Image (cartoon, grey):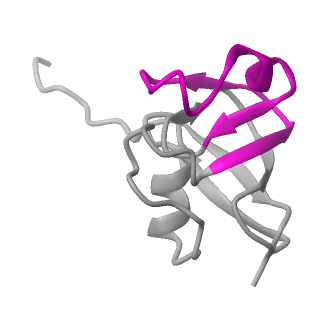
Amino acid sequence: MSAAVARSPKSYRLTIANIRQTIDCAANQTMLEAAIAAGIDYPYACATGNCGTCTSRLDVGKVILLPRNDACLSPQQIEAGQTLACRAKPRGDLTVTWLGRAGR
């Protein structure tokens, strides 16, 4: 059999503490992409890691960070458990709190 079998990307649970909502986030998706796809009004501006509007605290879990502007997320912020939702892909189930504005 030479036909390739299409596989769905692995999916994780992403809980956004500000709004107490849990959504699916594919391993190949950023947290921000998953939130937007689920209709969540997650704070962001550039979606490319250059502004810092989507800075979030990782309460539970780990992410892979895509390339970003170091001025938007310092090594100290990363050590303190912060990430950029637009540049963070899940490595497992996550719980995050956005820091850009109060929950609406």
Quadrant placement of the N terminus: top left
Q: Nearer the viewer, residue 2 or 45?
A: 45
Q: Quadrant of residue 67?
A: top left
Which quadrant, please, contains the C terminus?
bottom right
The extreme front residue here reads 71
Most foreground residue, 100 or 60: 100
- Give whichever of 64, 81 is nearer the camera: 81
Residue visible at 17% across and 26% down in the picture: 4
In the image, the segment drawn in magenta is: 55-84
Say which residue appears at 46% left-offset and 24% top-offset: 66
The residue at the far bottom in this view is 104
Relative to 45, say whether 81 is above or below: above
Pinpoint residue 79: horizontal percent, then vertical percent: 82, 17
Q: How many marks?
A: 0
Which residue lies at the image location 62% right of the left edge and 29% below the top edge? 73
Residue at x 85%, y 71% (from the top left corner):
20
Residue 75, position as x, y percentages in the image: 71, 14
Q: Quadrant of residue 15?
A: bottom right
Q: Nearer the viewer, residue 5 or 56?
A: 56
Where, by quadrant of the figure, is residue 49 drawn?
top left
Relative to 93, is 59 on the left or the right?
right
Q: Is residue 62 magenta?
A: yes
The image shows residue 48 at horizontal and vertical percentages of 37, 41
Query: Where in the figure is residue 43, as x and y percent of width and height?
Result: 59, 65
